[in-house]
Image: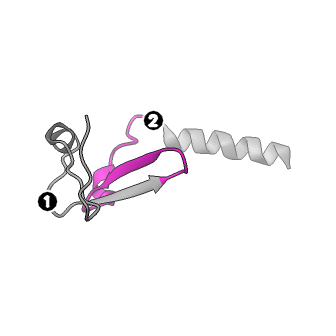
Amino acid sequence: MQTLVTRHGQTVIPSLIRKRHHIQTGDRLVWIDDGRIIRVIPVPANPIATLQGSGKGERLVERLLVERRRDLRRE
């Protein structure tokens, strides 16, 4: 997909991308430029609520405890 940049530096987010990522009027985007690639990341209105439950089933507490035990053995 391609878009044009206006003389004011504005561009259009293609409809398919807006729908797929649920981007709506007033939403914020973060632009990350690493010198080679520009990434545009949508920021949800409530990022905490959006992430809530996303780690479910990942056994994160168990993984954290395993890593802490490894750290203790290294000391």
Q: Secondary structure at mark 2?
A: loop
Q: Residue at x 40, y 56 (%)?
A: 31
What residue span does the magenta drawing correspond to? Answer: 33-57
Q: Secondary structure at mark 1?
A: loop
Residue type, label 2: Glu
Which callout, 2 or 1, points to the residue nearer the camera? 1
Q: Residue at x 18, y 45 (%)?
A: 18
Kindly indicate the quadrant of the structure image that contains residue 17.
Answer: top left
Q: Is residue 73 left or right of residue 26?
A: right
Query: Above or below — where is 75 with respect to 59?
Result: below
Where residue 16 appears, x then y in whole percent?
A: 16, 37
Where residue 57 appears, x then y in whole percent?
A: 40, 34
Kindly indicate the quadrant of the structure image that contains residue 49.
Answer: bottom left
Front residue of 63/1: it is 1
Q: Is residue 59 left or right of residue 70?
A: left
Residue under numbered circle 2: 58
Where residue 62 appears, x then y in whole percent?
A: 56, 39
- Report the disc number at residue 25: 1
Residue type, label 1: Thr
- Magenta span includes 43: yes
Within 10 Å of disc 2 (Cα), the crowding (few <14, some 14-19, many 20+) is few
